[in-house]
Image: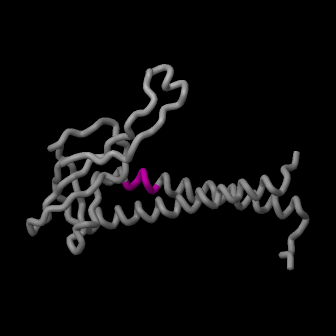
Amino acid sequence: MSRPPEEWLLIASICCVLAALGVVAVFYAIQAWLVRRSGRRVTGAVVGHHTGGWARLSRTSQEASGEGVRPLPRVPIVGFRTEDGREFRVRQSSGVILEELEVGYPMTVYYDPRNPKRAVVGEQADVVGSLLVGFALLVFPTVVGAYCILQLVLSTGNLQPSG
């Protein structure tokens, strides 16, 4: 059963967007890896939390829980001190937050000594996970998108550019 060309084009377009997200994820994972690799390691502590907003629960979840709106996960803000005594704050940007961390909870921070605002929270496993997700978002949609474009060309019978 053959799909109409519009469907192949739509699927290929969605794959392009997902692949672009993969490029962004890989870029940020590499940046975090570079800071962890060449940066300074210090122990910081949770100094507060950032809430991204509110999320609506689905109708089924609302009926089951009796709630309509719930807060999104609160992301820890970690304060740390550089070797020369300057204080900075950084938000945990990757990883899964399974529980809310108490203020004062110690966390590992890596920072760039030339620019301490470039800091990341967490361990090497966070980078590996981000890289895997990024590469999956990059490779899988690229392969599927290329297949869709091939199918689009074959279904239209037009191997030459129009014009």
Tell me residue 3's x, y (percent).
84, 50
Name the residue located 91 percent from the left edge and 65 percent from the top edge: 157
Look at the image and give the residue range highlighted in magenta.
Answer: 127-131
129 drawn magenta: yes
Q: Residue at x 83, y 57 (%)?
A: 5
Front residue of 112 and 89: 89
Image coords of residue 123 (percent x, y): 29, 52
Q: Quadrant of the N terminus?
A: top right
Q: Residue drawn at (87%, 49%), measured in percent from left and top?
A: 2
Rendered position, 118 above or below 98? below
Image quarter where the C terminus lies is bottom right
Left or right: 44 as drawn, with respect to 159: left
Q: Is residue 12 left or right of residue 85?
A: right
Judge whether residue 96 is colored magenta. no
Q: Residue at 80% across / 56% down in the picture?
A: 6
In the rendered structure, the answer to whether residue 131 lies left or right of residue 36 reads right
